[in-house]
Image (tube, helix red, strand yellow):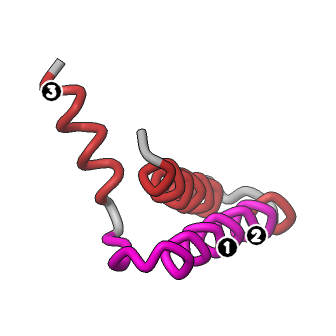
């Protein structure tokens, strides 16, 4: 998995974790930490894209890639 794919996957994992906490009614502190983690992951991806000049990120792309690789196995 390339560095970009790892960063995209980190953003998607952090977003899913944050949503899971919200949906299950977790307290404010864990939700805030999860959202801080998501924000940091987005920042890391943005820095990578700005540094490399690669085109922008498409939400869900990493998940779709992982699914297509799983199906190909």
Q: Position of residue 71 (x, y in %)?
A: 15, 27
Which mark is drawn over residue 10?
A: none
- At label 2, counting other C-alpha atoms closer than 10 Å, the crowd grade (few under 14, some 14-19, many 20 or more) is some
Q: Which of 37/17 is in front?
A: 37
Point 42% across, 51% down: residue:
5
- Find numbered disc 3 in the image and state the secondary structure of the residue it sits on: helix
Position of residue 20 measured from the top left corner of the image (x, y, whole percent): 56, 53
Position above or below: 40 against 9: below
- Look at 78% across and 69% down and name the residue there: 32
Question: Which residue has dot 1 on it?
Answer: 39
Compare residues 43 and 39 and report the one nearer the observer: 43
Residue extent of the magenta highlight = 32-58
Front position in the image: 29 or 42:
42
- The CA span between labels 3 and 1 is 31 Å
Rendered-image quadrant of the C terminus = top left
| Total tally of numbered discs in the picture | 3
Residue 33 can be seen, yes or no: yes
Picture residue at 33% right of the left edge, 78% below the top: 55
**Which residue is identified by label 2?**
36
53 within the magenta span: yes
The part of the image, by quadrant, that contains residue 25 is bottom right
Point out the residue furthest to the front here: 52
Disc 2 and disc 3 in contact, CB within 8 angstroms: no
Q: Quadrant of the N terminus?
A: top left
- Location of mark 3 (residue): 71
Q: Position of residue 31 (x, y in %)?
A: 74, 64
Mark 1 and mark 2 in contact? Answer it, CB < 8 Å: yes
> Disc 3 vs disc 1: Cβ atoms closer than 8 Å?
no
């Amino acid at each position: 998995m390339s560095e970009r794919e790892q960063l995209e996957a980190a953003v998607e994992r952090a977003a899913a974790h944050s949503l899971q906490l919200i949906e299950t009614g977790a307290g404010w502190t864990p939700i805030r930490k999860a959202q801080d983690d998501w924000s940091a992951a987005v920042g890391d991806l943005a820095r990578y894209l700005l540094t490399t000049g690669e085109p922008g990120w498409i939400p869900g792309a990493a998940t779709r890639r992982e699914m297509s690789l799983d199906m190909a196995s």
